[in-house]
């Protein structure tokens, strides 16, 4: 079966522009996470969706970051007015068990 | 505040030998620890986990050891193979915080011929 997919795989944007990153989780997985990995850093938690519950946004670094999960499936991470420090690989993961998380290949975001 | 630390950014091991990857943590609320493996341009893939009530878990060539008193865990790969060359991330799970994983910065393992 299909794994977690993310699009685009690469995104180059200019400082100040908005970007949208998409995640298609594995069908039937109720939990969805967004992480990011900056150069030389570990994976940093951003936001978590579980079913119809209110998302856990505690990891979002600023109010320029937001995410939605429509219909309990596809999720979109939006970064407004991008800054150079937003450059990173953004990873999405989904799980059914809340233990083993299945990751997508990531979106590499470069802000010039 | 780095709750999960992997102090060795890289490790080189000969094929057939043992690879030992280390991880230290500070958060006593972690109930599971996981190891993920990451190849370039791919997302991390789950490798092995251990419950905080265990001290060892083995799966084929991979064994994870947990020393709770020292807040230390290690991943042993025996024998190491060239295909094991990747970045390995240690992660702790805290069920009190939406089960999100807290990752270390990773150790790049190079298995040489």
Image (cartoon, rainbow, N blue to C red):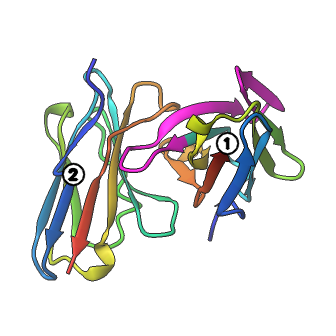
Packing grade of label 1 (10 A; few <14, some 14-19, many >=20) is few
Viewer-closest of A109 and B103: A109
Look at the image and tell me in which quarter the C terminus of chain A lies. bottom left
Residue B101 screen position, x and y as percent = 53, 47
Asked if badges 1 and 2 are on one and the same chain, I answer no
**In 3D space, how far apart are the residues under numbered discs 1 and 2 (Cα atoms)?**
32 Å
Packing grade of label 2 (10 A; few <14, some 14-19, many >=20) is some
Residue A88 as seen in the image, left or right of residue B7: left
Q: Secondary structure at mark 2?
A: loop
The image's mark for residue A9 is: 2
The residue wearing badge 1 is B113
Work out which residue is located at the far top of the displayed protein and give it: A1
Q: Is residue A78 visible?
A: no
Q: Is residue B24 magenta-colored?
A: no
Residue B68 screen position, x and y as percent = 84, 45
Query: In which quadrant of the rendered view does residue A10 lie?
Result: bottom left
Q: Chain of mark 1?
A: B
Q: How many marks?
A: 2
Q: Chain of mark 2?
A: A
Work out which residue is located at the far right of the displayed protein and give it: B69
> Which region is colored magenta?
B37-63
Residue at (37, 51) in percent of width and height:
A56
Residue A96 as seen in the image, left or right of residue A68: right
Query: In which quadrant of the rendered view does residue B62 lie?
Result: top right
Q: Is residue A103 above or below residue A44?
A: above
Residue B70 screen position, x and y as percent = 88, 52
Is mark 1 in CB contact (under 8 Å) with mark 2? no
């Amino acid at each position: 079966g299909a794994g977690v997919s993310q699009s685009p795989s690469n995104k180059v944007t200019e400082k100040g522009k908005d970007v949208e990153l998409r995640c298609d989780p594995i069908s039937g997985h109720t939990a969805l996470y967004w992480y990011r990995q900056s150069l030389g850093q570990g994976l940093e938690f951003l936001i978590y969706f579980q079913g119809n519950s209110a998302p856990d946004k505690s990891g979002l670094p600023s109010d320029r970051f937001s995410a939605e999960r429509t219909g309990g499936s596809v999720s979109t991470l939006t970064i407004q007015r991008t800054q150079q420090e937003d450059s990173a690989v953004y990873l999405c993961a989904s799980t059914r068990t809340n233990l083993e998380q299945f990751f997508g290949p990531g979106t590499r975001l470069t802000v010039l | 505040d780095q709750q999960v630390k992997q102090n060795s950014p890289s490790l080189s091991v000969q094929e057939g030998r043992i690879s030992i990857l280390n991880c230290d943590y500070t958060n006593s609320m972690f109930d599971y620890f996981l190891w993920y493996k990451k190849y370039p341009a791919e997302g991390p893939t789950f490798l092995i986990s251990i419950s905080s009530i265990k001290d060892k878990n083995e799966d084929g060539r991979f064994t994870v050891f947990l020393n709770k008193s020292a807040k230390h865990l290690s991943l042993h790969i025996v024998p190491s193979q060239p295909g094991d060359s990747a970045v390995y991330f240690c992660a702790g799970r805290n069920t009190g915080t939406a089960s999100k994983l807290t990752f270390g910065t990773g150790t790049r393992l190079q298995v040489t011929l």
